[in-house]
Amino acid sequence: MPPKALTITELTRGIKHLLEGNLGRVFLQGEISNLARPNSGHLYFNVKDDNAQIAGVMFRSVAQRTRFALENGLEILLHGRITVYEPRGVYQLIVDRVEPLGAGAFQLAFEQMKSRLSAEGLFDPEYKQPLPFLPRGIGVVTSPSGAAIRDILNVLGRRFPSIPILINPVSVQGDVAAKEIASAIGHFQGMENIDLLIVGRGGGSVEDLWSFNEEVVARAIFKSKIPIISAVGHETDFTIADFVADLRAPTPSAAAELAVPLLSDLTDRVGNAGRRLISSLQQQLQVHGEALNYYQKRLRSPQWVIQRHMQRVDELNGRLSNLIYNQLQGADNRQESLYQQLRHHSPLPRIEQSQIRIKDLKRQLLSQSSLILERNRNRLQAQTQLLNLASPLSIMDRGYAMVTDSENRPLTSVKAVKVNSPFSVLVPDGLIRGRVETVVPSPPRGSKPKSEP
């Protein structure tokens, strides 16, 4: 009897139980290849060495916790469990932890973030804002209980105690720290009297400082309209925030020293400037005083100048009076001459002659017009009489009438009518309408008329 055949599912499940039961969780070392990032957020890739490869899966929750980004060609250490993906019949590694070979995970993540943000231009010097010489107010984003805030307040109070300081307390390490730092930076953007920010914390491990390497903090610093001094850790510590900020301070205390000038230095500078100003004014007053004395000695009495000008005024006044008199006299003579010429050439006599001539012409015009009107009136009466004699209406008055057809055309022949044709008879006092009953043509001339039956 032949052995019972297994189904593909039974065989695959047997292999799965065998692998998971004997191997379980493993550490693998290899190189990533064929990396895929679908929209689900899961990562699919192969891990290979020189002679073999295995499929790997990193689900989204694990990928989000990983500090660095997986890349093709990256040498890594993986921890996970071996399993079989039954629909395809392949074995694979479900990864729950990954570390890069060589540099640590934090260092690799730092380099990846630095390279990507640098390529976007977030570190470019052209976007760095200058710090105000003397801020109206300073905002501080840090932990309210750390050593950094005490150092900042001590230095600011010593250097320039009158400058207002506003603290926005945040967490500086942990899962929520990066979001709190970015939110605090954004909160300061709406405050008019804050024109400088200090963002930082005291020293610590790479893990402790990691919040200042997060992308959300870097972009908040880059978008800030207020200049920002980054003060994270010690002088040897560098974070992404240091590269994006407008100025990096090696320590929080150094940030406070860079934020404000020393009040005593400003006081000395103002005092020295005031003394130099007073000295300069005194020198100028002395020079101008000596010049004034010099000109006072050379200045003559103004009465001499005034007397000379008064004499000149009298002389010019006399010359002006003579000139005006001569011009007025000449104007009177010219006026008299023009008056005589005007009288000689006056148009009045010719106007009077023209008026007499116009009156004569008017009388002649009236006489001729009367004669012409009378002649035309007589001619019109004669023409009217002739017209009345030729008018058919005057002939009708003598017993005649006018006969017309239906279209008001005169009937001059019996040929123009037929029996029952309508006709009209126009008499002086009205119109007679009728119809033709009989048509009797006139006999030719010289013939005898036919007798009626």
Image (cartoon, grey):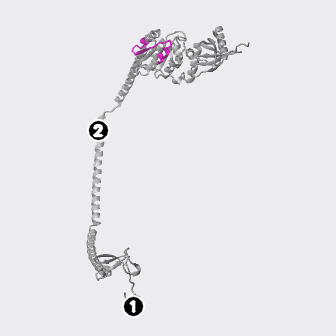
Q: Which residue is mark 2?
A: 307
In which image quadrant can residue 135 be found? top left
Does the stretch in magenta take in 282?
no
Q: Is residue 274 above or below residue 438?
A: above
Residue 133 visible within the image: no
Q: Quadrant of the C terminus?
A: bottom left
Q: How far from the left and from the top, in percent, is residue 297?
A: 34, 29
Q: How far from the left and from the top, in percent, is residue 183?
A: 46, 18
Q: Secondary structure at mark 2?
A: helix
Q: Is residue 329 above or below residue 216?
A: below
Q: Is residue 235 above or below residue 417?
A: above
Q: Which residue is mark 1?
A: 448
> Which of marks 1 and 2 precedes in the sequence?
2
Residues in magenta? 155-182
The front one of 128 and 398 is 398
Q: Secondary structure at mark 1?
A: loop
- Label 2, label 1: how many angstroms apart (C-alpha)? 151 Å
**Is residue 176 toward the left or the right of residue 338 in the image?**
right
Does the stretch in magenta take in 168?
yes
Residue sitting at x 39%, y 84%: 441
